[in-house]
Amino acid sequence: MLEYPMSICMNPRRPGSYFIGDRSSIRYVDTVRNTVSVIAGSAHPSRNFKDGPLVSASFYGVMGLLCTRDGRHLFVTDHHNGRIRSIDIESQKVTTLDGGQIEYPRKMAFDVCLRAALDDGVREFVLESRLCVTADHGIIRRYAIDTTGSGDGVSVSYWNDLPFNLSDGSGWLDVWGIAITSRGHLIVSCQQTHSIYLFSPTGLTAAHAQRIGGCGGHVRHSEGFADGAAGESRFDWPADLVLVEPDRCVYVCDRRNRRIRCVTIAQSLLD
């Protein structure tokens, strides 16, 4: 039985299997074999932090999970430890990305995915060029990483903080969920304003925020439940979200309404 599931991602190497962040543990669910096992950490929260072999590694609040498309690396937002951790699936080793601490990291997304072949033309790898992580105070941190298998496997070449402050008087955009389209549009959920926002690839600033769900504004005036167009629809603490191909539909976990909502993005906003 799960204790307090907070994150989930698919295992691309095995259809029908998933990684689940459950309090301070990572569980592996195989729906084909109908099994659930703990592969790292403990379901009982504790202030532990330890890299090394997967079986002895420890976490403190697994808020987000994200697996590379080749299935070789699993990234973890270690929420209370303020770190981004990386699990090498093949070597069963846990390391910490060298990007400094980040205050209460939450969810993750890749913003550019490139597929290339090695010189022998046989083996392929996936390069996830930037790992975007949401955190408290409306921050999105962007890590440039290399998962090609060369060198030490995962490295951080730079990171940058992007705080958002909305121009409509709503204040800081308390970013929670994050998704990025194939064209580079950034989509985020904001629990403070109970809304979903879209940013163009060339306008990653608050002034360029397009609200595509919810009505914005302050907490007391914007929560609720209603379908409809942006400005008419209502959410109540939207949390994680996932982009559904082909880039025009976003599924949102509407936490307090206890529903999964679908937000359709107008084509004009994506052109």
Image: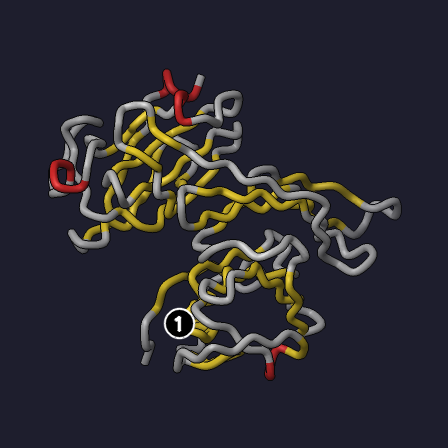
Q: Position of residue 233 (x, y in %)?
A: 16, 33
Residue at point 58%, 42% (across, down): 142
Q: Using the image, determine if residue 148 lies above or below residue 190.
A: below
Q: Quadrant of residue 56?
A: bottom right
Q: Quadrant of the C terminus?
A: top left
Q: Position of residue 253 (x, y in %)?
A: 28, 50
Q: Which residue is more in the foreground, 165 or 248?
A: 165
Q: Position of residue 129 (x, y in %)?
A: 66, 42
Q: Using the image, determine if residue 85 lies above or below residue 118.
A: below
Q: Is residue 173 left or right of residue 155?
A: left
The colour scheme applied to this rendered structure is secondary structure
The residue type indicated by label 1 comes to Asp
Residue at point 48%, 33% (across, down): 181
Residue at point 72%, 49% (across, down): 146
Q: Is residue 78 left or right of residue 259?
A: right
Q: Using the image, determine if residue 199 lies above or below residue 12.
A: above
Q: Residue furthest right?
A: 120
- What residue did someone put label 1 on? 22
Q: Position of residue 260 (x, y in %)?
A: 24, 49
Q: Quadrant of residue 89?
A: bottom right
Instruction: Report if residue 17 is visible in the image.
Output: no
